[in-house]
Amino acid sequence: MKKFSTEIKWGVIFILVGLIWMVFEKLMGWHDEHIQDHGLYTNIFAIVAIGIYVLALREKRDRDYDGIMTWKQGLISGFLISIVVMLLTPLSQYITHYLISPDYFANAINTAVANKYNTQEEAEAFFNFKSYMMISTLSAPSFGVVTSAIVALVVRTKRG
């Protein structure tokens, strides 16, 4: 486990920062009175996510690889962080949708139907805990690997 302590630490940090972001979104009204803006503004978190991966891979390089890291080592480390994130995502989704923003799905459904983006049935099929749980859990590794591949190019060393 010590071998993967950096990845576990940064996976947990990623989830905690994500929860803080959800509180921020809720405070900004993106889960209720300004929910129509949620789809646009929630994407800002991608910048935060990339920043977390940069910090994580820099720490991995400097502490675990004595300052020398190959792209492959960075990619593997980032993938492991993504696995930790994936494993913690169900808990994060639960906290988000049952504690931080319990009215999010009802608000999203109402907005989608009122603006004729979806029928009631379509909106209910998409905006629900099971759907979000599946989407977020399955997307964590793929987004994590893509992010890791790019960040590892930046963080790797010339000798690595």
Image (cartoon, rainbow, N blue to C red):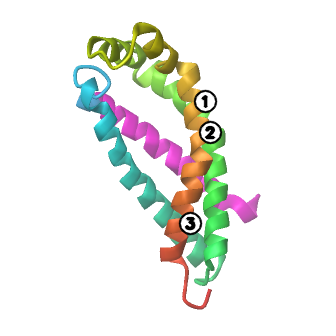
Q: Is residue 111 left or right of residue 6?
A: left
Q: Chief secondary structure of the magenta span?
A: helix
Q: Which residue is mark 2?
A: 138
Q: Which mark is residue 134?
A: 1
Give the residues in magenta. Answer: 1-26
Compute the Cα span from label 2 to label 3.
Answer: 18 Å
- Say which amino acid is labelled 1: Met
Mark 2 / mark 3, whichever is N-terminal: 2
Residue 35 vs residue 68, the one in the foreground:
35
Residue sitting at 47 percent across and 22 percent down? 97
Residue sitting at 65 percent across and 79 percent down? 65
Q: From this viewpoint, is residue 10 visible?
A: no
Q: Quadrant of residue 135?
A: top right
Secondary structure beneath dot 1 equals: helix
Q: Which residue is mark 3?
A: 149
- Viewport quadrant of the C terminus: bottom right
Please say if 64 is above or below 5: below
